[in-house]
Image (cartoon, grey):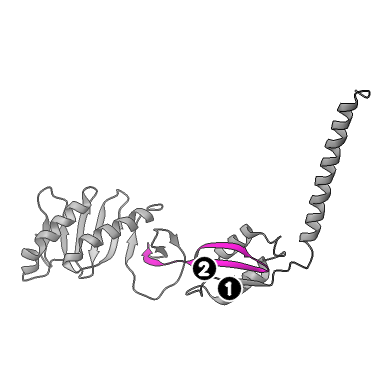
Amino acid sequence: MWDNAPLLRSIANGLFGLSLVLVLYGAARYVLQLPVFPLRAVELTAPPQRVSVEALEKVVREKVSGNFFTVNLEQTRQAFEQLPWVRKVSVRRKFPWTLEVEVEEQVVLARWNGTELVNTYGEVFVGKVEQVLPAFIGQPETSQLVTQMYGELNAILQPLQQQIVQLSLSPRFAWQVKLDGGMVLELGREDMQQRLARFVAVYPYSLAATARPVNHVDLRYRNGFAAYLPGSDV
């Protein structure tokens, strides 16, 4: 091997190239750590509505470290997403010395099982809100299913000009709806949309004309439904 000049030259060239790469890498790391690249500003793309500015500033003070090139974007994103009412965050560098933060806040849709909230994506989160909201009741991991059904059923109810104030999904996956007028509708476990559409179609010509308001309707019949009046068993 030692008398093979071409091989020795190839090995020497390879070692020289590797050394050069290591030197350049070390020099680049040193330059990037210099204070000439300070991170001078953290900029929000839009003013927050529910997330407090003080909470955002606290994250910047306690969690954002490094300069423009060395700041860890993933760790910074995760720190912002721990704040209440924050759903999703994107963080990017904005040359020459700014960190740009885009915060997507939670848009609350309903209360979930009386203790939590659910957003428009069907995701459950913790928060406090004073406004009147529909009540969703369901089993764990069914919040997205309940949210989707809420949208579908509310669309069907539009001709009656009534809104859902409570939507329940039982452990046996049976659906129940309570309307803002107080009426409770039993939809069962199958063909829920078709059953509700049939009820909406006949309601103005039947139950709406009764002397007493109907408080409970069972739609779990193949070709009709059963209505229960206050103080009556039928």
> In this view, which residue lies farthest toward the right?
3
Q: Is residue 101 visible?
A: yes
**Type of the residue with mark 1:** Ala
Identify the image quadrant of residue 111. Answer: bottom left
Identify the image quadrant of residue 91. Answer: bottom right
Marks 2 & 1, CB-CB < 8 Å contact: yes
Q: Quadrant of the C terminus?
A: bottom left
Q: In this picture, is 172 found above or below 112?
A: above
Identify the image quadrant of residue 227. Answer: bottom left
Please provide the residue range marked out in magenta: 88-112
Q: Quadrant of the N terminus?
A: top right
> In this view, which residue lies farthest toward the front?
6
| Label 1: element kind | helix
Q: Is residue 177 visible?
A: no
Whole-angstrom CA distance, mark 2 to mark 1, is: 9 Å
The x, y position of residue 21, in whole percent, is 80, 46
Q: What residue is rendered at 40% in x and 63% in y? A: 119
Left or right placement of residue 112 versus residue 228 in this view: right
The x, y position of residue 98, in whole percent, is 65, 69
- Prevailing SS of the magenta stretch: strand
Q: What residue is rendered at 41% in x and 67% in y? A: 107
The residue pinned by badge 1 equals: 55
| Label 2: element kind | loop
The x, y position of residue 116, in whole percent, is 42, 64
Q: Is residue 90 part of the magenta span, yes or no?
A: yes
Which residue is more in the foreground, 25 or 222?
A: 25
Left or right placement of residue 199 versus residue 91 in this view: left
Q: Is residue 174 part of the magenta span, yes or no?
A: no
Of callouts 2 and 1, the N-terminal one: 1
Classed neighbour count for the residue bearing mark 2: other residues with Cα under 10 Å, few (<14), some (14–19), many (≥20):
some
Which residue is more in the foreground, 112 or 37?
A: 37
The residue pinned by badge 2 equals: 84
